[in-house]
Amino acid sequence: MATISDVAALAGVSTATVSRALNGKSTVDPVLAARVLDAVRELGYQPNGPARNLRRQEAAVLALIISDVENPFFTAIARGVEDVAHAVGYSVVLCNSDEDAEKERRYVDVAVQERAAGVIVSPTATASSVGALVRRGTPVVAVDRPLPDQEIDTVLVDTRQAARQATTHLIEQGYARVGCITGPAGVRTADDRLAGYRDALKAGGQRGSTRLVRRTEYKAAGAEKAAADLLGQEERPDALLVANSAMAVGVLTALRSHGLRAGRDVGVVAFDDVPWAGLVDPPMTVVAQPAYELGTVAAKLLLARIADNTRAATTTMLGARLLERGSSHRG
Amino acid sequence: MATISDVAALAGVSTATVSRALNGKSTVDPVLAARVLDAVRELGYQPNGPARNLRRQEAAVLALIISDVENPFFTAIARGVEDVAHAVGYSVVLCNSDEDAEKERRYVDVAVQERAAGVIVSPTATASSVGALVRRGTPVVAVDRPLPDQEIDTVLVDTRQAARQATTHLIEQGYARVGCITGPAGVRTADDRLAGYRDALKAGGQRGSTRLVRRTEYKAAGAEKAAADLLGQEERPDALLVANSAMAVGVLTALRSHGLRAGRDVGVVAFDDVPWAGLVDPPMTVVAQPAYELGTVAAKLLLARIADNTRAATTTMLGARLLERGSSHRG
DNA sequence: GTGAAAGCGCTAACAA
DNA sequence: TTGTTAGCGCTTTCAC
């Protein structure tokens, strides 16, 4: 593979001039620059990234560590990050931690070792690994979930408020025993959605009960079992707040196998406005989170912090919107 | 940030011994190895990846270039690739080409520049960029779509056969005018699905007609327009073969706005067994592609080729399964 | 504006 | 088994 020396030799200049011509930092005689470009083309020269990164002590790469590639919420974030990063010449490496602290730690190590310019992470519950990054001075932005005890830029959705609003909506529609299926304890979004749910019950004068709440993985299978469990009880809930779209799949499946109809028999509101929400019968009421925007904001913050790591840490809170459809109406 | 020299100094050994102790290539006196490990821990040493890659002339990284991160089919492939790669110590960089030849070219360049050990790609229609990779001698595997005129390992689904089977199924269910909504011309899977559809029409004695076929982006919006267009015709189709799940969303939406019911009024079979397929009313008949397996097979082939680039290129063809549900039955 | 040369941190060939 | 040392390809002073 051709190196910068080959290009220099062919163009009849020094490697320094080739470097300058290619990076446009310092100004180069147009004639020489043209000779360099010709040589590059002729040799099919591709700069050696590791060599450049070694010399520069940093790679033009952002690491994005998300907890589930198969969750549309996170892929939408990824698109937001990519669009912003690419516009200014950064590449994005997408890492899937799978909600597993060990995998997260591993990817954090990779990011450090490859000298990524910065890291955007949606931390798992036990996110000690990211703390090390911060202490190293690596620019880090937390997205979707905060990183406790860390002074870092954070981009969140006001999910507690959204859960409260969604639950209040169910109560106002006349559902008398609203239940909640949320994610694992310790996962901040799961905790917040539960808290918002409880806020609404209290405000709406409904008596909460642990018998109306189930927590499982943010997956369809767990939610299906949880829903079946709740619906099998003597005093079963007549409505459910569901904490993400994968869980919604499980809940709707359970409803169907119990011969119950969403809306009429059991009110349903789920987080995330997936493309199919309008296609189920009745269409599903959802809390639409601004996922793409979460990604763009996080990327911009990270780029700003890469440029100047002395900035004070900020927390950005974006709002969610309740999209009312048939699954939260009795009629 | 601590370097290998710092570790060597603290452990009282040479940098070579540190390197050996950490990489386990050659054997090292257990006592020294322990001192090295202690020093590593104490300094929080993280090896400098670029330096290592520069020296080794290759990074333990596989690039996976897919055409749509938001398509569950491709994220399932990604999981398959990751699982295989991680098991043998490779990282996976996920790149989203967005069905855009220019973005694909850019990611190919990144892969070359970063000296990735190999590349797995689902090529866009005009995939000249990947040819350059192959000529460079970089190990490459094509997944989901072949790379024309290239002698490389390829992992495909027998999508033409699957389309034929799905269409035949619709004909056997009594649908008399089966239409097809597929992806852009030049995208091999889109072409193959159309070909399989036509195979079935011919075998089933139905007269094909271009008035029953529409081609658009592999997206919901395009498919919705295409379906509305088909359904607005005088002699409209009474069944549709739909080439992916995003398109299925558009088709079902169009059906609804025309007051038509899937199955009873218009038979529907779509590619890809998405989680929500069973939740729409009636449940959607799908062609289930072995996406995860596509990923694992591709990754294994790539690893084999990295180990030995003289192997002859192979083509692996995996089968798809038709999952019959209500949307393809009149009853 | 250009070139010579140092050196980023690591691994591997060679010597001891 | 261990240490010494060259050098991977690039960018960036520094001198001209």
Image (cartoon, coloured by chain):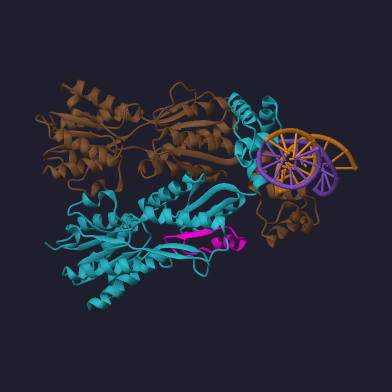
Chain colours: A cyan, B brown, C orange, D purple
Query: Quick one: A328 or D16, which is closer to the camera?
Result: D16
Query: Quick one: B175 or A201, which is closer to the camera?
Result: A201
In the picture, the quarter occupied by the N terminus of chain B is: bottom right
Q: Is residue A143 magenta?
A: yes
Specify the quadrant of the image occupied by residue B295: top left
The residue at 58%/63% (across/down) is A310
Query: Quick one: B58 or B202, which is closer to the camera?
Result: B58
Above or below, A183 relative to B71:
below
**Is B86 left or right of B6, judged from the image as shown?**
left
Is residue A184 visible in the rendered image? The answer is no
In the picture, the quarter occupied by the C terminus of chain B is: top left
Q: Position of residue A174 (x, y in %)?
A: 16, 70
What's the magenta region?
A: A124-145
**Is B141 left or right of B242, judged from the image as shown?**
right
Above or below, B194 relative to B220:
above
Q: Position of residue A185 (x, y in %)?
A: 41, 67
**Is B233 left or right of A8, judged from the image as shown?**
left
Specify the quadrant of the image occupied by residue A253: bottom left
Q: Is residue B177 magenta?
A: no
The residue at 34%/37% (across/down) is B289
